[in-house]
């Protein structure tokens, strides 16, 4: 979601269209023992434009199967010539563990063009305070936003509350220190550690309402009209922060979050939700308009719109397939669509008719969806 006021024949898609790019890895930067930054050169076909806070979808072939994963850009289009994403190893992570072991400088990786709505427009006339809550790898889109804010809005400030397991797991620690020194008085970074060393002078433990009140005493108070709250990190952390901000009477419309993993409904519940979406066990026809083409196809019960399109060779955009990244977002111009998961869409987006094809099921025969 964008923040801060802060948007009758079957055809085969052209898989070589402009939505795909081949990027060359320029450099691999170790960040922590389990995190690296992949620095990509801009494509020779022309500079790849993106907005701060957006993500890249990397497409790799594993066991003769195409696998897609989205990674937020930690670079800023205002400060960095290259495109940079951060990859952190996770238990059982198929792509996040494969990339550090197999990618080298010179490796070429297919990507989908930058997407995502966890962004805003920057202007030198703006004067605002962005308060960020980051946890672990959730710092990635925050880096892109804070670098853009500090360089493009001289009257705006940023406060970052960054939670990590221990001091060695702080991603971009050196870079954050440098930015805080360069923009003294405009960037306030507060680290919170689960396991703090004996000589730690900062905050430790899980965020609580008592700790949050103390943290707010350390950051500038610009009032609600000029302050926006962002969060990105583990689901538990974000839920906790959301509750704490609610207890402090922070309006929901001032709070924006970016989710990396599905945590609101587990797999079994998603399957139950799918089964519950189908009315009368009936298939429905769907029309999708994308990239100047129009596609009509029948979606069977318990199948999503995206699944059906991909099975028929229709190359629609997607990444997470969990209803979170919004890469597959489209606007339903007519008809009824039921979503298994609505976490990726804001209330205003849902009200405007936006749907996610990866978790969407048609509930009528007149569904028309426009993507892009």
Image: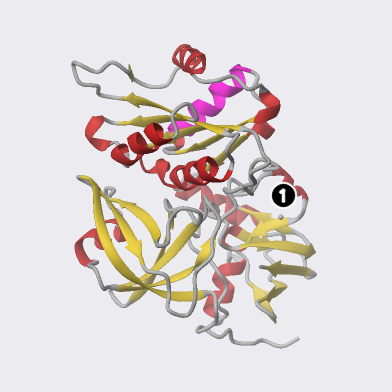
**Secondary structure under badge 1?**
helix
Could you say which quadrant of the image residue 63 lies in? bottom left
| Residue 227 vertical placement versus 211 (above, below) | below
Give x and y (percent) for residue 119.
58, 49
Binning the other alpha carbons within 10 Å of mark 1 as few (below 14), some (14 to 19) or many (20 upward) gives some
Q: Which residue is mark 1?
A: 350
Depth check, front residue: 80 or 271: 80
Q: Is residue 255 left or right of residue 132?
A: right
Q: Where 176 sits versus 106, above or below?
A: above
Residue 356 placement: quadrant = bottom right
Numbered-mark total? 1
Question: Residue at position x 63%, y 71% from top?
Answer: 300
Task: Report whether residue 261 is seen.
Answer: no
Is residue 52 located in the magenta-colored stretch of the structure? no
In the rendered image, residue 210, in percent from the top left (x then y), is placed at: 47, 11
Could you tell me what secondary structure mostly forms the magenta stretch?
Answer: helix
Viewer can see residue 18: yes
* Along the line of sight, the residue nearer the viewer: 76 or 167: 76
Q: Give the extent of the magenta segment.
A: 236-248
The x and y percentages for residue 146 are 49, 41
Q: Position of residue 327 (x, y in %)?
A: 56, 61
Q: How was this image coloured?
A: secondary structure
* 87 sits to left or right of 119: left
Which residue corresponds to the image point at 56% horizontal and 56% vertical from the top-left? 51
Q: Is 92 in front, or is 278? A: 92
């Amino acid at each position: 979601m964008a923040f801060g006021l802060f948007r009758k024949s079957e055809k085969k898609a052209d898989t070589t269209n402009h939505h795909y790019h081949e990027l060359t890895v320029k450099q691999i930067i170790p960040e922590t023992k389990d995190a690296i930054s992949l620095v990509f050169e801009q494509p020779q076909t022309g500079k790849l434009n993106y907005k701060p806070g957006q993500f890249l979808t990397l497409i790799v072939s594993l066991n003769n199967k195409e696998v897609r994963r989205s990674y937020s850009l930690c670079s800023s289009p205002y400060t960095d010539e290259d495109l940079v994403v951060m990859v952190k190893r996770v238990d059982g992570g198929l792509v996040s563990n494969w990339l550090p072991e197999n990618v080298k400088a010179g490796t070429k990786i297919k990507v989908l063009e930058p997407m995502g709505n966890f962004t805003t427009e920057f202007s030198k006339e703006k004067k605002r305070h962005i308060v960020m809550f980051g946890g672990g790898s959730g710092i990635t889109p925050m880096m892109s936003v804070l670098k853009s804010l500090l360089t493009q809005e001289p009257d705006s400030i940023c406060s970052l509350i960054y939670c990590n397991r221990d001091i060695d797991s702080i991603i971009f620690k050196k870079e954050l220190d440098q930015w805080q020194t360069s923009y003294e008085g405009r960037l306030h970074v507060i680290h919170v550690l689960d396991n703090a060393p004996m000589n730690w002078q900062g905050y430790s433990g899980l965020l609580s309402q008592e700790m949050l009140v103390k943290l707010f005493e350390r950051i500038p108070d610009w009032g609600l009209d000029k302050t926006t709250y962002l969060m990105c990190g583990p689901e538990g952390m974000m839920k906790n922060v959301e509750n704490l901000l609610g207890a402090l009477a922070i309006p929901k419309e001032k709070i924006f979050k970016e989710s990396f993993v599905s945590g609101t409904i587990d797999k079994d519940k998603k399957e139950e939700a799918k089964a519950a979406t189908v009315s009368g066990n009936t298939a429905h026809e769907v029309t999708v308009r994308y990239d100047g083409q129009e596609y009509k196809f029948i979606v069977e019960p318990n199948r999503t719109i995206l699944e059906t399109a991909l099975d028929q060779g229709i190359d629609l955009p997607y990444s997470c397939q969990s209803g979170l990244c919004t890469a597959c977002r489209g606007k339903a111009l007519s008809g009824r669509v039921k979503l298994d998961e609505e976490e990726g869409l804001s209330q205003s987006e849902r009200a405007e008719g936006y749907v996610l094809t990866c978790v969407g099921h048609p509930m009528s025969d007149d569904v028309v969806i426009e993507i892009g």
